[in-house]
Image (cartoon, helix red, strand yellow):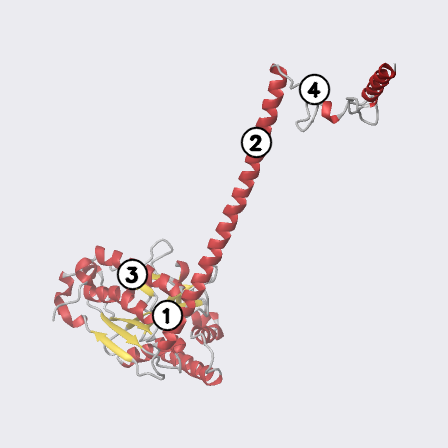
Amino acid sequence: MDNDSHTVTTTQSKSEWEGMGPKPHKRRCANANVRSRDDDVSNPYALSSRPEPTGDAVGTKQKTFLLSNRLLRHKRSVRLLLILVVLLVLAFEIHRREEERKEIEKNSKEDAKYRPPWPLPTQWKWYEYSLLFGNERNNRCDECKQSNDARKLLIGHYSGVGDKYEMMLDIASTTSKAYGRRWGVDVLKMKGVALGPAPEFAGANKIEIIQTAMDASAQYDTLFLLDADAIIIDLDLDFLSLIPEDKMLAAHRVNQSHAIHTWDVNNGVTLWNLKHPKTKQIVDEWKDRWLQRVDTHHDKWISDQDPMQELLKEKSDEERSHMIHSMASPDGSLGRDADHIAVKHFKRSAMFDWAGGENIERSLKLRTAKNEVCKRFHPFCEEPRT
């Protein structure tokens, strides 16, 4: 009995134990009417205990989700790629500007390193092409036969020395000498600093050249004066045709709306009538005003054009009408009109940028222009054999 009783008791206890054990249950939200997130088939992160749904409808949803997920990742990748490209472009631009700055500093240091002591004696070189052909020069130039102008022309081309402008002069003067050979015109090539204590004052060399040409006025009637960064590109044009015989000066008109006898002219490319009664007076006073400014501001760059323009501006309209003939040519260049350029002037863009990297680019442009002229007028660009 005891054993049976014990067995029954043990059986009951086991049954009670089984009844008291954990029972499987379903997770529910706080609100009984709302399904759990885990039961939502459309939620990709659901942890539902229901079996994996099958069928075309559910498969389409899953494919749409996977596609949208891929597109989202693709958009993010594109954005990151665009940001990376922008950063690379910015980095390249910063690097380029830094290299340009270093190049400018390097050129400035090289110019200072190789700059000769000042003051330096000027170098004057004359090419007397008028003596090469004599009366036979008309056989070399068809345009010379058509010109009845008896005036004698001198071409003056100048620069400083020991800087990039000297290199520009050596390039540009090639076509000046070619023009001299073609037309039987003398050429004066001048280097140095005639009026000033530094290479930046070489612009005033034009004053010294004009006075030198006037001292030789028995030989010459007109002076064609060019800066180092100006180059003759048309060897067919008779430059005497650009200055009327009764005018003192022919030059580029800075403001195209001004009158033809305006004082506002660029003096980088000019034609001077050496026989005009006002030429000596204007040039002498121009020199005096220049030297006064050098004495006052000897440590600063001084524009050689400003005192000349001031002198012309002080004259009345009536006086200037008998002195000045300005031309509407673009960018300081010179020609018959705006559509015909005979002399191209590659001016610097910055007023005080004398040793910048831009000078290298201007030298390359001058060399390209020279090569084009010499290709067209090949025989005249060659130095005569001695």
Give the Cα distance between marks 2 and 1.
Answer: 74 Å
Give the class, few, some or many, for how many residues have Cα within 10 Å of label 4's Cα (few <14, many ≥20): few
Give the Cα distance between marks 4 and 1.
Answer: 103 Å
Q: Quadrant of the N terminus?
A: top right
Residue at (52, 50) in percent of width and height: 87
Viewer-nearest of labels 2 and 3? Answer: 2
Q: On the image, numbered disc 3 is attached to which residue?
A: 367
Q: Nearer the viewer, residue 24 or 280?
A: 24
| Circle on res. 87 | none
Does label 2 or label 3 sit earlier along the sequence? 2
Image vertical order of residue 121 relative to residue 58, above or below = below
Q: On the image, numbered disc 1 is attached to which residue?
A: 249
Viewer-nearest of labels 4 and 1? Answer: 4
> Whole-percent x and y of residue 74?
55, 35
Q: On the image, numbered disc 4 is attached to which residue?
A: 50
Amino acid of disc 4? Arg
| Circle on res. 71 | 2
* Occupied quadrant, residue 235: bottom left
Give the Cα distance between marks 4 and 2.
Answer: 29 Å
Look at the numbered disc 1 and give the secondary structure of its residue: strand
Is any part of residue 132 visible from this angle? yes
